[in-house]
Image (spheres, rainbow, N blue to C red):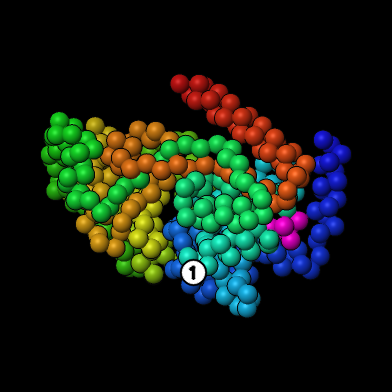
Amino acid sequence: MVDIAQQAAIHAASARDAGAARARIPLTAIDPGQWRALAQRAVEPNGYYLPAWELAVSATARGRSNASALPAFDGSSTRLIGLMPVISLWRAWKIPLPALVSAHPYGTLCSPLIDRDAPIEAARRLLQQAREAGAHALVLTDVALDGAAMNSLKQALDRDGLRPRVLSSYIRASLDATQDGETLLRDALGAKKLKELRRQRHRLEEHGPVVFEVARKPDEIGPALETFLRLEAGGWKGKRGTALVQHAGDATFIRRAVPALAETAQCEIVTLRAGTTPVAAGIVLRHQDRAFFFKLGVDEHFAKYSPGVQLTLELTRHLCADPAIASADSTASADHPMINPIWRGRFAIGEVLLPLRRYDPVVTLVHAAVAAHGIAYATARRAVRLLRE
């Protein structure tokens, strides 16, 4: 195994010629206009790979900066038809094998941008770019397993006699925003639970009129973002040291990304107030007809009124009333205790290995190494949870 790994490393080093350099380039080398145009034509929405968001992440976000890109162009080499932000397997998990991994865009969705007008060609060219960059495999993390982007990649692999390997998966909550909001909430939560939540809202009104606000305009979004950041830092994330504002690079990223996306109506911040006091706030991205619920912050002094749930109920009504939105991705973990009972749609998210060559022993090594890393990571997370209990 060591010999093969060393040979693979030598092969990767020998592939650093002009062609390989063109195959994998800095994200900043992608023309922003081409990137935005591709995002408009993407076969599957992904708000976290919009240029304003991912460029801000790659510029300063903690542990996520300096990502590369695999670009795919059409036959004329002038039209961008595919884009996959990536990092090396070594950088991702300290595994010394020639593979590339999805660059994590902070939000838990890494489905690449693939042109709906030429999905198979775009997928095929992305895979070829990865080969020319010296990779033997691609590892896509947090990809929609049954999404249009993954289906395009499957078809492209099938033409080469290759098949993707699902390494892990889980089921995530989503919202069917084409339904009537009140009907959806009643069916999801039941009359008894809704009555209890209304009672809590009435008690919250003792602190002042409860108002749901949506900040979209550039002059609104800055103050709303600062409100969100204060709420997030004042809660359990602040206590654990994981709030965005607690790390300079993360704070810079979010303060750059949110206003930039607001300029193109692709980000809004929702806030719930009791009188003049903000009790909950959330960041929502928009791409095509899909919304993405990025993060939620609450004032824990109002915990007995379930401010996070109250905000999510209002957000549900808001999205269902918007004809431009057909669905919303919770981008939450599996079995999330707050969002899962409210948003009853479900879809599969997973980690997938895409082999790039047939009968390649290096792919077997990559598979084994990534699987072992996943087992070790899961064991460590369980140990941390036990220590905190």
Q: Can residue 289 be spotted in the picture?
A: yes
State whether the magenta stretch is mostly helix, strand or loop.
helix
| Residue 164 horizontal side relative to residue 40, left or right | right
Residue drawn where x is 75% and y is 44% of the image: 359
Question: On the rendered image, what quadrant is the C terminus found in?
Answer: top left
- In the image, residue 132 lies in the stretch drawn in magenta: yes
Q: Which amino acid does label 1 sit on?
A: Asp
Q: Can residue 222 be spotted in the picture?
A: no
Q: Is residue 354 above or below residue 29?
A: above
| Residue 133 horizontal side relative to residue 335, left or right | right
| Residue 173 horizontal side relative to residue 254, left or right | left
Residue drawn where x is 18% and y is 34% of the image: 190
Across and down, in percent, residue 325 comes to 30, 59
Residue drawn where x is 80% and y is 53% of the image: 12
Q: Residue 213 sits in which quadrant?
A: bottom left
Please report the bounds of the magenta region as a residue range: 130-134
Q: Residue 81 sits in which quadrant?
A: bottom right
Residue drawn where x is 83% and y is 52% of the image: 11
Across and down, in percent, residue 388 comes to 48, 24
Q: How many marks?
A: 1
- In the image, residue 23 lies in the stretch drawn in magenta: no
Closer to us: 291 or 125: 125
Q: Residue 25 sits in which quadrant?
A: bottom right
Across and down, in percent, residue 214 comes to 27, 58
Question: On the rendered image, what quadrant is the N terminus found in?
Answer: top right
Return the residue at label 1. 117
Mark 1 element type: loop
Decide: few, some or many residues near mark 1? Use Cα within 10 Å; few <14, some 14-19, many ≥20. few
Across and down, in percent, residue 258 comes to 42, 61
